[in-house]
Amino acid sequence: MRTTFDFTPLYRSGIGFDRVLDALEAASRVESIDKWPPYNIAKIGEDDYRITMAVAGFTQDELTVTQEQNMLVVSGEKTGEDNGQYLHRGINGRAFQRRFELADHVKVSDASLVNGLLTIELKRELPDEMKPRRIAVAFTGSPPKVQTKRIEAGKRAA
């Protein structure tokens, strides 16, 4: 059973959350049938993440990792033609493209291929103006005086 959500009320009352709501809507709409290649996403620190993909049979030259705005695209395509005769072929060598939606200020810091595992390191780097900052509280001596006005109500007839 598939449940769909209507985000229309949130668009009317939320300001500046368009991108988040669009991402939620896209995630609820897209159901990936192809689960290949398998991957893990791990949070390895406060602002550090790691994606590990099992890409057995692919070389470094056959893989492409691209970051476009807030989208990370990992694709692989075999370049050479394999003319071997197989009795069983369990290592999948078909072309693939896997997309990951990235949050604001998340950048790819490194990518490496070791023993058939493609590891992509990601780091969230907030600009200085977005980091929390401490505001100094000045001491002025005595609190400012507030003048109050007294409003008298007129007498009511009984």
Image: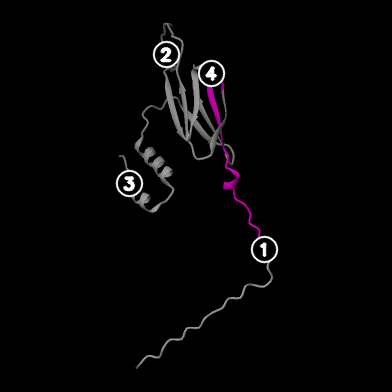
User: Which callout, 4 or 2, points at the residue further toward the start of the chain?
Assistant: 4
- Residue 35 can be seen, yes or no: yes
Instruction: Measure the alpha-carbon separation of dots 3 and 1.
Output: 48 Å
Residue 92, position as x, y percentages in the image = 43, 18
Please name the residue that numbered disc 1 is placed on: 138
Q: Quadrant of the N terminus?
A: top left
User: Which callout, 2 or 1, points at the residue further toward the start of the chain?
Assistant: 2
User: Which callout, 2 or 3, points at the residue further toward the start of the chain?
Assistant: 3
Please name the residue that numbered disc 3 is placed on: 6
Amino acid on which disc 2 is placed: Arg
Let me know if residue 121 is in the magenta part: yes
Give the extent of the magenta segment: 113-137
Let me know if residue 134 is in the magenta part: yes
90 in relation to 47, above or below: above
149 in relation to 61, above or below: below
Amino acid on which disc 1 is placed: Ala
Which circle marks residue 60 in the picture?
4
Element on which disc 4 rests: helix
Residue 53, position as x, y percentages in the image = 50, 26
Proximity of marks 2 and 3: CB atoms separated by less than 8 Å: no
For residue 3, what is the image quadrant?
top left
Please name the residue that numbered disc 2 is placed on: 89
User: Which callout, 3 or 4, points at the residue further toward the start of the chain?
Assistant: 3
Element on which disc 2 rests: loop
User: Which callout, 1 or 4, points at the residue further toward the start of the chain?
Assistant: 4
